[in-house]
Image: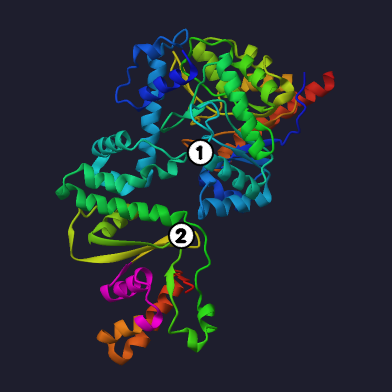
Amino acid sequence: MRLIDWQLAFESYLLGEQSAACPALSAHLIGGPTLDVNTGLAIYHNAYQARLLEVLRGDYPVIWHWLGDVEFEQLAAAYIRQSPSVHFSLRWLGESFEPFIRQHLVPEQSAALAELAALEWAFTLAFDAPECKPLTLQDMAILSPQDWPTLRVCPSAAVQWLECAYNSIALWRSVKDESGFPGSAALKAPHVVVIWRSELVCHYRSVESGEARALKGMFQEDWDFAELCSDLAVSYGEGAPLQAVTWLKQWIHDGWLKRRES
Amino acid sequence: MSASLPCLGYGLGLRSTYYQQILEQSPAVDWFEVVSENFMVQGGKALYYLDAIAERYPVVMHGVSLSIGGPHALDPAYLNQLKLLAERVRPAWISDHLCWSRGNAHQLHDLLPLPYTEESLYYVAERVRQVQDVLQRPLVLENVSSYVRSADDDFSEWQFLEALSRLSGCELLLDVNNVYVSARNHGFDPWTFIQGLPANKVRQLHLAGHSDYGDYVIDTHDHPVSDSVWALYERTLEYLGPVATLLERDDHLPPFEELLGELQKARELGDSVLARRLKCA
């Protein structure tokens, strides 16, 4: 049997659902005095499934907690079958778990679970996002008055943004704190959660709707500071610049911003 | 017979559980081995601790995803990240496994055995040369533990490793536990394996624990080193002389002090073997 045929048969066996190998592969394998070929192959098959399952449990501990061992394992196995790993690092195995959940389950089942998956993955992304030098209050102190109106910012590398319609944060918090699991529930009104890393530690903060609108304008609609103040003037009137500066200061304090060069 | 490559001493596999203790206690560990892929990230805790530990200790990079025998082209993105990490860490050497871990289309994330045939030998040797050209240094390859082997083999595993080293210039990482595990599973003499390797190409040794199921043994890295493996290690050192030794533990991680105690056992055993060897010389 040529090397490539041997390997393709082995790969096909590992990716398959059954731990029994096809005869064409088995015929080209040898076990040992007390280890038969089928048992030897099953060791590889089990290890493949177990290793990937363990990674998904590590990436999605709250979903695992919610579903329990059996249901989580079924969901993970279906995911692995549909999206076998294509990256050399297992770090990226769970990247498509959220869209998979949306597609695999009916909407009534999937919506809250998929949102939770997105939240857990956002923490993963923030955890090892590239280092970057965020905008500091010192940078702002030396900004000349004529530069303020045209100031544009973008999110620093470790900032993740998630719109939550369910109590995903409460579920996440309960597992982190090892307190009682509250059960999934829809929120009265959706809200935005920002997840980021400061130094080496990940944080999150729920952002109320006015602040979320301001952030979205700056991050996604390329507003400059003058446009932010104009938008806020509708709600805050003459107090708009003060509100804009207050939020800007908080975002800078949290390390969320990088200056966007125009 | 004697190994002739420089010896780093006695090292531990770097695991995140122990990062903080290593920095706070500066334990008596001669060097650390890092799993390369764990640090192929762009930022965060892993790289922070890697930089801090690499400032204090010699580091060796040990990969699991090169897939040197895989049925696919070598991954330039992977090699590029490996090279970038090496530039950051300045490892004493870079190792991976004589295996394949990626199939035709998918990553299999396991250290799968190769058929030890002439076809495999020339295929792998050419790929080793390609990797060495990129890294500009010899690649160090480890023998894996296995649970099946090809019925069409032209060579024993040790003959294959010897020939590969000769053809490609690669060096060897001799995992004493893997030799023991495969010897039990396939019914060969572990000592014949070790004696069949080119001693002057053995850059490093691995020690680890396994799980013994009676009829077969699995390389689980979740137990202390077994007495049988300690005995094989002692005999290996008598044969090879001083070779850098690394204690691996990947699961059921014990308190750090316990791991340091096991490393100390390797050190004391190694020191006494080497002293005995010196007397006889």
Q: Position of residue A125 (x, y in %)?
A: 41, 54
- In this view, the residue farthest toward the bottom is A238
Front residue (pair A228, B45): A228
Q: In the image shown, does A184 or B110 lie closer to the viewer? A: B110
Q: Indicate whether residue A223 is drawn in magenta.
A: yes
Look at label 2 and name its amino acid.
Answer: Val
Quarter of the image where one finds residue B177 = top right
In the picture, measured across the screen, residue B199 lies left or right of residue A29, that is: right
Question: Can residue A32 be seen in this snapshot?
Answer: yes
- Calculate the distance from the C-alpha at mark 2 to the C-alpha at mark 1: 25 Å
SS type, badge 2:
strand
Say if B38 sits above or below A248 in the image: above
Report in which chain the residue with disc 2 lies: A
Residue B236, image quadrant: top right
User: Mark 2 touching mark 1, by CB under 8 A?
Assistant: no
Please say if B184 is above or below B52.
above
At label 1, counting other C-alpha atoms closer than 10 Å, the crowd grade (few under 14, some 14-19, many 20 or more) is some
Residue type at the position of mark 1: Pro
Residue under mark 1: which chain is it in? B
What's the image's color scheme?
A: rainbow
Callouts 2 and 1 on one subunit: no
Q: Which residue is mark 1?
A: B254
- At x 36%, y 52%, the residue is A121
Q: Position of residue A147 (x, y in %)?
A: 49, 84
Q: Nearer the viewer, mark 2 or mark 1?
A: 2
- Count of all numbered marks drawn on residues in the image: 2
B214 in the magenta segment: no
Which residue has dot 2 on it? A201
Q: What is the span of residues highlighted in magenta in the rendered image?
A: A206-227
The residue lying at 62 percent from left, 53 percent from top is B52
Q: Is residue A178 visible?
A: no
Name which residue lies at 58% across and 24% down: B124
